[in-house]
Image (cartoon, rainbow, N blue to C red):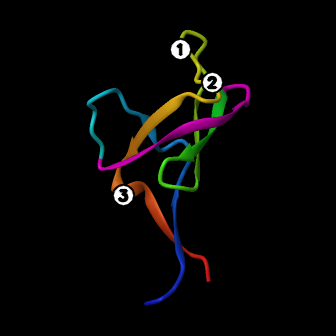
């Protein structure tokens, strides 16, 4: 409804890390604030440049270098993965 407070929700495994110059329908940039190892996955809490925070969770791969707190991160995802939530 007009005037309602809403939020946008994206499942934490939906965003993918974007390489330099790579485009996506939706893009967010920020700084990794926290890294949590969950066995077969790694969860990153990202402090977004535009305000707020986003959680992303990706499979753990021993051969891939993990991100650390303070690292810059740019992620992207498709618009059909966004869910609108009524906060009122």
Residue visible at 59% across and 20% down?
66
* Crowd band around label 2 with a 10 angstrom C-alpha radius: few (<14), some (14–19), many (20+): few
- In the image, which disc is placed on residue 64? 1
Does residue 39 appear left or right of residue 77 in this picture?
right
In primary-sequence order, the first of circles 2 and 3 is 2
In the rendered view, tell whether residue 23 sits above or below residue 42. Answer: below
- What range is drawn magenta here? 25-40
Residues packed near mark 1 inside 10 Å, few (<14), some (14 to 19) or many (20 plus): few
Q: Quadrant of residue 70?
A: top right
In the image, residue 2 above or below residue 38? below
- Disc 1 vs disc 3: Cβ atoms closer than 8 Å? no
Helix, strand or loop at label 2? It is loop
Q: Nearer the viewer, residue 39 or 53?
A: 53
In this rendering, which labeled residue sits more in front, label 1 or label 2? Answer: 2
| Residue pointed to by mark 2 | 68
Of badges 2 and 3, the one in the foreground is: 2
- Within the magenta stretch, is there residue 36? yes
Quarter in which the C terminus is drawn:
bottom right
The part of the image, by quadrant, that contains residue 79 is bottom left
Most common secondary structure along the magenta stretch: strand
**Residue 28 placement (x, y as % from top left):** 43, 46
Give the vertical position of 54 relative to 37 (above or below). Answer: below
The residue lying toward the viewer, choosing from 84 and 46, is: 46
Mark 1: secondary structure:
loop
Give the residue at x 73% y 26%.
39
Q: CA distance from mark 1 to mark 2?
A: 13 Å
Q: Which residue is mark 3?
A: 80
């Amino acid at each position: 409804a007009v005037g309602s407070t809403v939020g946008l929700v994206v499942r934490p495994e939906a965003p993918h890390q974007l390489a330099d110059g790579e485009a996506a329908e939706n893009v967010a940039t920020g700084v990794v604030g926290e890294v949590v190892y969950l066995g077969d996955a790694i969860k990153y809490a990202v402090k977004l440049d535009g305000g707020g925070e986003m959680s992303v969770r990706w499979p753990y791969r021993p051969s891939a270098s993990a991100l650390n707190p303070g690292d810059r991160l740019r992620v992207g995802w498709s618009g059909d993965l966004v869910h609108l939530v009524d906060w009122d």
